[in-house]
Image (cartoon, rainbow, N blue to C red):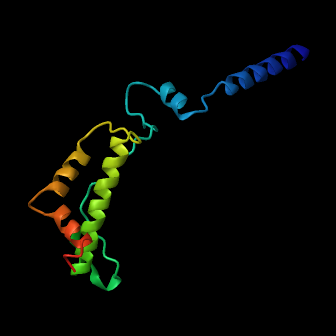
Amino acid sequence: MKFLNTVLLSASVLATSLHAQEPYTIKDYNSSNLKHGVVFNWEYKPTFYTGFAPRVEEPTRIYTKASRGNITRVTTILDKRSILTYMFNLKKRYEVFNKIVNEGYIKEYHLNQREMFNQIIESKAYKILPTIEAFEKGKVT
C-alpha cells in the first residue's frame, strides 16, 4: 500500500511538472502545432478594407429583397450628398492607409490590395481626388 501511494504521488508530481511546461503564448502554441495538415494560424496580420461599398445613413433609402436560393439583394438610393460624403471617406481612407504604411506603423505582408485601391482613387476616370479638392475649396456645393 505504501508503495502504491509513492507511485501515485510521484505520478501526480510528474503530471504537474508536465502541465507547468505548456505554452502560454500564441507564438509558443503555433510553434508546437503539427507542421503537416491544416492548422489554424493565430498570428494576427492587419488587413485593409479596400472595397467600394457606399454607406447610406437614412434607413428609408435602403431596400432589401430576399429571392430564391437564399439570395438577398440590398439596394440603396444615393443622393448627391451621399455620393460626395462617400468620395470624401474614400479620400480619407486613402490618406490613412498610405500614412500608416509609409510611416512604418503597419507592414504589408502579401497581396497588392492597397496598391490597386490607390490606383482607383488616383484614376482620372473616376476623378475622386479632384472632386474632393474642389468640394473642400468650395467650388462644388
Observer-nearest of 140 and 115: 140
In percent of the image, x 38 and y 33: which residue is there? 38
- The structure residue drawn at horizontal position 28% and vertical position 55%, both measured from the top left corner, is 94
| Residue 95 x, y percent position in the rendering | 31, 54
Numbered disc total: 0
Q: Residue furthest left?
A: 125
State the image quarter where residue 55 is shown: bottom left
Q: Residue furthest bottom?
A: 60
Q: Position of residue 140 (x, y in %)?
A: 19, 77
Whether residue 30 is visible here, answered yes or no, is: yes
Residue found at x 78% / y 21%:
13
- Is residue 47 shown to the viewer in this render? no
- Left or right of 96, for residue 13: right
Image-based side of 32 in relation to 137, left or right: right
User: Which quadrant holds the N terminus?
Assistant: top right
Q: Relative to 79, say whether 124 is above or below.
A: above
From this view, report whether residue 73 is shown above or below residue 13.
Answer: below
Relative height, residue 83 to residue 100 (above, below)? below
Q: Position of residue 27 (x, y in %)?
A: 51, 30
Specify the quadrant that holds the C terminus: bottom left
Furthest residue to the right? Answer: 2
In this orientation, which residue lies closer to the viewer: 76 or 136? 136
- Observer-nearest of 118 and 28: 118
Residue sitting at 13 percent across and 56 percent down?
A: 123
